[in-house]
Structures are given as C-alpha cells and as structure tokens.
Amino acid sequence: MQQRKSKKILIYFFLLFVVGSINNININSLKLQNINNINIIGLDIKEQSNLIKEIKNFNLNNIFLINKSDLVNEIESNSLVENFIIFRRYPSSLDINIEKTKFLAKINKNGQIFYLGSNGKFIKNDFLNNQLPFIFGNPDVTEFFKIKEIIDKSKISYTEIKNLYFFPSQRWDLELRNNIVIKLPNENTNLAFNLAIEFLYNNEFKDNKIIDARIKNQIILDD
C-alpha cells in the first residue's frame, strides 16, 4: 500500500515538472511587440504629428507594460488638450481620443501673441481668429475666468466683447464691438456689470460711449 502511494507521488511530481516546463517554454517564446501605432482623434494632421513625436520621446514598451502615468503626463503637457481618453488595442496600438481646448482670447506675452484656451493654458499657434477678444494687461488666468463667467451669466454674449483691459488694481474695463466701454470695480463686479447693462440697453443713453460703474450703486455716463 505504501509503495503504491509512493508511485503516485512520483507520478504527480513528474506531471508537474512536465506541465511547468511546457508553460515556461511558452512564456519564454512569447514575444510582445512594442507599441508601433498611435492613432489620435480630435487634432488636425500637424497637431497629431507633433503630439505623436512628444509621446514617442519616452519608451512606450508594449501595451501591457506601458507606464501609464508617463503617457498621461505627456498628453496633459500638450497645451491644445482639454480632455482625453486612451484605448489600448492589441497587439501594439494606442487610440487616443482628444477634446481640443477652445480658444477664448488673445494676449501679448513678452512680445508674442498667445491664445488663451478653455483649459487655462497659453497656446502659441498658427490659428488666426480676429473675432476673439484681446486681453490687455497681465491678469492671472483665474481672474480672466472670473470675468468671463460674469459675462456668460449676463444678458451680453461673450462674442460682443472686443477687448478686455486688466489693471494692476485688479479691475476690468470691457470694450464692446460697438466701441462702448464699461468700466468695472474690483469688488461686487457682478452687480456693477448687470447694472451697467441696464443702461446699455436703454435707448435714452444709446449715444454714450463710456459706462462707468466703478462707484458702488452709481453709474456715470460719458459721451
């Protein structure tokens, strides 16, 4: 009886050895391809080419061993990207769907014209849009988005804004496409702007070119 048990144990060891050897041979012979195909959707051809070059600057490895954080950081560093989704496609492809940022305004920084995107980044681009408002001064990005939110919630469309002037006192002047200038305070800006708009749409004051709302609860008009 003991002899039979010993034989069974030897057989089990033999089978484990054989199966293990076969698996090792299969694993060792399996060669995963490095990523060699990157498909980008959402950018134009030139922008796609530039981003692909940036992505290929680091070792992509294969789709199972790719360093996801490196890839994400590389894509996020591109100023044109608002949002994105990455799909791994076996055996050696990446599909990247990109939501491109929207250009909101133009600004002069150190003698060069940049576009400010909805992602909060300054973008040097060949894109030309003379309908975008120009920002004068040197506001922090958060200050721009504050004033834009006020405009978007008002009766005025953002497309009616021709220029935005930012002052060191942290306040804005807005020049409309009809050349009317609205002067705003650095506090209670929302209330002052909405009050100014009431005069803007009043035919009695249609010839006024400056609406000064800098003093609380007061509007000063200037021809």
Image: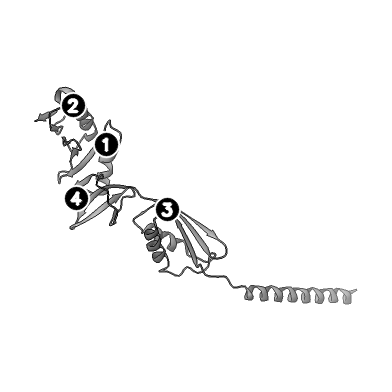
Quarter of the image where one finds residue 47:
bottom left
Image point (18%, 26%), residue name: 199
Whole-angstrom CA distance, mark 1 to mark 4, is 19 Å
In the image shown, does 8 or 179 lie closer to the viewer? 179
How much space separates mark 4 and mark 3, taking CA atoms?
A: 31 Å
Q: Residue 109 appears at what percent x and percent y?
A: 20, 55
Q: Is residue 101 above or below residue 24?
A: above
Residue identified by numbered label 2: 199
Instruction: Name the residue beneath numbered marker 4.
Output: 138
State the residue position of label 1: 151
In this rendering, the label closer to the viewer, 3 or 1: 3
Q: Position of residue 196 (x, y in %)?
A: 19, 30
Q: Residue 81 in the image: x percent, y percent? A: 38, 54
Q: Position of residue 27 (x, y in %)?
A: 64, 73
Depth check, mark 4 against mark 2: the one in front is 2
* Precedes in sequence: disc 4 or disc 2: 4
Please indicate whether residue 12 sits to the left or right of residue 116 in the image: right
Q: Residue at x 16, y 30 (%)?
A: 216
Residue type pointed to by label 1: Ile
**Dot 3 or dot 1, earlier in sequence:** 3
The answer to whether marks 3 and 1 mark residues whose Cβ atoms lie closer than 8 Å is no
Q: Which residue is mark 3?
A: 42
